[in-house]
Image: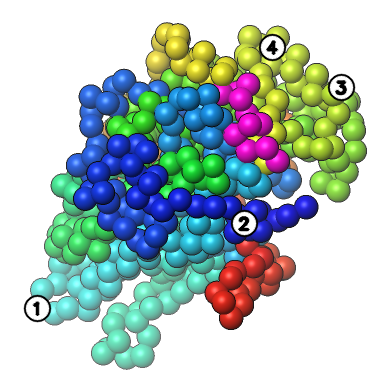
Amino acid sequence: MKSDIEIAQAAKMKPISEIASSIGIDQDDLIPYGKYKAKLPLKLIDPKKIAKSKLILVSAISPSPAGEGKTTVSIGLAQALNRIEKKTTVVLREPSLGPVFGIKGGATGGGFSQVLPMEDINLHFTGDFAAVEKANNLLAALIDNNIQSKSRSLNIDPRTVHWRRVMDMNDRSLRNVIVGLGGTASGIPRETGFDITAASEVMAILCLAENMDDLKNRLGNIFVGFTLDKKPIYARDLKAEGAMAALLKDAMYPNLVQTIENTPAIIHGGPFANIAQGTNTVVATKMGLSLSDYVVTEAGFGFDLGAEKFMDIKCESSGLWPHAVVLVATIRALKYHGGVAVKDLTIPNVEALKKGVANMQKHIENMNLFGICPVVAINRFTSDTEEEIEVVRKTAEDMGVPISVIDIWGKGGAGAIDLAEKVVEITSKPCKTKKTLYDWNWTPERKIETIAKKMYGAQAVDYTQQAKEDLKKVYSLGLDKIAVCIAKTQKSLSDNPELLGRPKDFVVTVRQIEIAAGAGFIVPITGQIMRMPGLPAEPSSEKIDVDNDGHISGLF
């Protein structure tokens, strides 16, 4: 059996100009990045076309170490929709090099449901991540430069600065560092650290900005810290937003590529869902809706994370709303939530499945909270038995949710025709009443408690002393009327990764609250979430290589 990269390298790609023509893009509007990649100008976004197109969100149950294939399903579904003559574009996030070289691998799908060129997308692509990194680190440099300055000092109190540098790599050694060592000519020593680029507020801003003016305004609103006399300092006070936006000029344009079946694919932005909002850019989604009749997009990790943030942050900010939501589940993941060890997931175990299916039930209940129309997709693997599939099918149908068994890894779009037809049927009918989980005007405490109790199933929310002090700061800055982006483990509905299935009677503990004023939300951090991940004992990078002809191997 061929690996993902072998399948990708054997695929016949069309020139990007042909892919662009298939969705009505004039060649003069393309900004080519080689033969198979291009950027798209924002002038192609058309509000009238957006209003007529259908948006399909792909989410999932709580993930397991075996993986659920949410990106693969998104790509396969888009290919299937085109097979039944529905003009469709898939819109996804860009992969981060952290997971690529770490433990998770790439994020371009798998088997015969991949986006191409797979190697480029998983590595440097069009340089968007590098631009976000540089813009973020420019602000960090400007902050330290102003602290050092004598003639133009804003009187920044270094102890209040929480803006950190970023890089697109898993490197735990950089989580906590001291800068400014080496004497007075090298700056003022202070403690700081690095986050991964995907967790940067600049990435969040890029993904929510509607245009260049909005981008600059959001960048200017980044909260930096306080002066020694307790006055707030923002990036605009450092006159940083113009230069930061200049670095992000090209990164603001969505990237056009294709799938193995030559379905148009727009890939743009890359925030993680456990520590950021977990969805691609607003402009990429709107671009796809402007150029096709159907758009398939995804939200990171389980419905409790990426999808909740998709609805409550991205949709509320942009005016978008999904016409259907696909919940991806796998038999092996549900058995994992039923207590089966990873090494035993391919062994039939109906009893464990019946226990673990409670996780899926909770996610379906969560979908109903938003008044959206759900469909469950069982991403089938060869080890799944008919008896196991029937358990999941009956569970979904008892909840009034249609279900489809798909094989998109091995068959591509042909393996998701039934799902595509069900999605088209759902989107052709008026859905339930659209509703977000909370009102931005509520207090931060009420918003956090609503998410924790309704979405996660928590009994209560507790705050550390640090989090309580952070809340006071939120109120003092007048930032209590913005969205909430909770940082939480993806492995559990709770904030404890060990609590699998559908945990109950647990308390969510908010350790601290970070401010992302430019992005338009606060970030309550729960559990042991790290904004700079580390590499595993055996990183994926050990398997990656390139030969004399430039052919890359080992990516997955």
On the image, the x and y values in percent for residue 216 come to 19, 52
Q: Residues within 10 Å of mark 3 (few under 14, many from 20)?
A: few
Residue shown at 31%/53% (left/top)?
Answer: 39
| Residues at marks 3 and 1, CA–CA distance in whole angstroms | 75 Å
Residue shown at 66%/65% (left/top)?
Answer: 554
Amino acid type indicated by mark 3:
Glu
Mark on residue 10? 2
| Residues at marks 1 and 4, CA–CA distance in whole angstroms | 70 Å
Q: Residues within 10 Å of mark 1 (few under 14, many from 20)?
A: few
User: In this orientation, does residue 276 appear?
Assistant: no
Amino acid type indicated by mark 2:
Ala
Using residue 312 as the reference point, say whether residue 332 is left or right of it: right
Closer to the camera in the image, 313 or 511: 313
Q: Which residue is mark 4?
A: 397
Q: Which residue is mark 3?
A: 387
- Element carrying mark 1: loop
Dot placed on the residue nearer the N-terminal end, 3 or 1: 1
Q: Does 417 lie within the magenta span?
A: yes
On the image, the x and y values in percent for residue 350 come to 88, 26
Taking 265 as reference, is 421 above or below it? above
Count of labels in the image = 4
